[in-house]
Image (tube, rainbow, N blue to C red):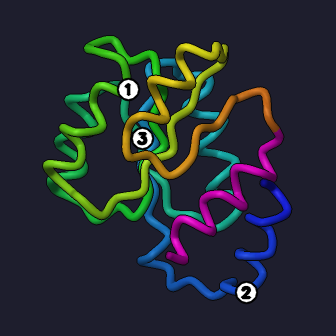
Amino acid sequence: MARILQMNYLRNTKLMGEEKNILIIDPDSDDRNIMATFLRQNNFTVDTGIGLADAFSKISEGSYRCLIMDVDLHEMKGYEAVPLIRSIDSKIKVIMTTKKNTKELESKVREQDIYFYFIKSFGKDELILVINNALNQ
């Protein structure tokens, strides 16, 4: 999978600055800040929020090409929120994240219209490839 993502990225490496807007929604401040810092260091424009209220507000007001959202939100499961997010912005690419994966959780997440399911223990380079591919579509 990573090889395919990398090949797609290499074919489409030019992104305009305004096209690199990413929103991270994660209730864990450490995870949120680490991911935001890493992405900013890789020339992405990043905004962050804690939960669904932030997601709804920011997506309604801003122009994000990609949403990175944790499964474990306080209000509801992230995968349950995807249809609500889509009602605000049907084109946003959703990358769902989690610290702990189970087959049941993965099945529920993949039933939604998400772009990628990212386990936080995976390498950050894979996340960059996924984001670039999402933004280039």
Q: Which residue is mark 3?
A: 48
Q: Name which residue type carries label 1.
A: Gly
Look at the numbered disc 2 and give the secondary structure of its residue: helix
Q: Main secondary structure of the magenta part?
A: helix
Find residue 119 and report its image quarter. Answer: top right
- Image location (x, y in percent) of residue 34: 66, 35
Residue 58, given in percent of the width and then of the height, sits at: 24, 47
Residue to which mark 2 is pinned: 11
Mark 1 vs mark 3, CA separation in Å: 15 Å
> According to the image, label 1 marks what residue?
78
Instruction: Classify mark 2: residues with Cα within 10 Å, few (<14), some (14-19) or many (20+).
Output: few
Name the residue located 18 percent from the left edge and 38 percent from the top edge.
Answer: 84
User: Foreground: 24 or 5?
Assistant: 5
Q: Residue at x 21, y 57 (%)?
A: 89
Mark 1 or mark 2, which has the lower sequence index? 2
Residue type of the residue flagged with mark 2: Arg
Q: Secondary structure at mark 1?
A: helix
Going from N to C along the chain, the mark reached first, 2 or 3, is 2
Q: Which quadrant, please, contains the N terminus? A: bottom right
Name the front one of labels 1 and 3: 1
- Asked if the residue under mark 3 is in contact with the one under mark 1, i.e. CB atoms within 8 Å, the reply is no
Amino acid type, label 3: Thr
* Mark 3 neighbour density, 10 Å: few (under 14) some (14–19) many (20 or more): many
- Circle 1 Cα neighbour tier, 10 Å, few/some/many (<14 / 14–19 / ≥20): many
Q: Which residues are magenta?
A: 123-137
Vertical comparison of 59 with 11: above or below: above
